[in-house]
Image (cartoon, helix red, strand yellow):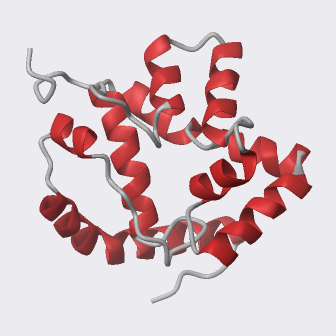
């Protein structure tokens, strides 16, 4: 079966999408000084969170590895752990779930929903191929989705904060 024909379970995608960066929360809550150094490095070096923690860490554990270990501890299915653990570096032959989490994460960052919206986003060529996408189709997706998704996020945040809806 062609990997583009392989279906990804919505529940698997939803869980992996929600939990792929939970390692950042662990870093932020329990290792605030380390998290702060990552954020400062991002600003100083104009790089992504992952690039900053990798550069600073020199072999130390990264947020994606922490996230994967949390899922392992929770005895989640292997494919979910793999998608979470590989969302920055999908490897030579990513599964559709790994590729989907990688591309979705990169899309969100490119649309400005990450920590540093000025950093250029890098899409893994093999992940794009797994999903039958090109850089051009991804660029079209970003332009099409940026404004409506930003509006929806702002409305949701306003509702959560009890603000009146904006027109």
Q: Residue at x 72, y 35 (%)?
A: 61
Above or below: residue 5 compared with residue 63? above
Q: Nearer the viewer, residue 29 or 151?
A: 29
Q: Residue at x 66, y 79 (%)?
A: 163
Q: Residue at x 40, y 70 (%)?
A: 111
Above or below: residue 25 compared with residue 19? below
Q: Position of residue 96 (x, y in %)?
A: 27, 29
**Residue 7 visible in the current orientation:** yes
Q: Nearer the viewer, residue 99 or 55?
A: 55
Q: Position of residue 123 (x, y in %)?
A: 32, 53
**Residue 47 sits in quarter:** bottom right
Above or below: residue 68 compared with residue 36? above
Quarter of the picture containing the C terminus is bottom left
Q: Position of residue 150 (x, y in %)?
A: 43, 73
Q: Residue at x 22, y 71 (%)?
A: 144
**Residue 135 sits in quarter:** bottom left
């Amino acid at each position: 079966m062609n990997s583009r024909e392989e279906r990804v379970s919505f529940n698997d995608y939803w869980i992996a999408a929600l939990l792929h960066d939970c390692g950042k929360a662990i870093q932020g809550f329990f290792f605030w000084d380390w998290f702060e150094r990552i954020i400062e490095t991002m600003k100083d070096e104009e790089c992504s969170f992952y690039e900053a923690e990798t550069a600073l860490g020199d072999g130390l554990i990264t947020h994606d590895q922490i996230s994967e270990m949390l899922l392992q501890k929770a005895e989640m299915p292997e494919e979910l752990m793999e998608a979470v653990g590989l969302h920055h570096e999908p490897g030579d032959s990513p599964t559709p779930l790994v590729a989907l989490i990688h591309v979705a994460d990169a899309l969100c960052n490119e649309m400005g929903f990450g920590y540093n919206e000025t950093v250029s986003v890098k899409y893994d060529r093999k992940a794009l191929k797994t999903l039958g996408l090109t850089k051009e189709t991804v660029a079209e997706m970003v332009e099409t989705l940026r404004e409506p998704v930003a509006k929806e996020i702002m409305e949701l945040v306003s509702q959560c904060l009890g603000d009146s809806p904006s027109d």
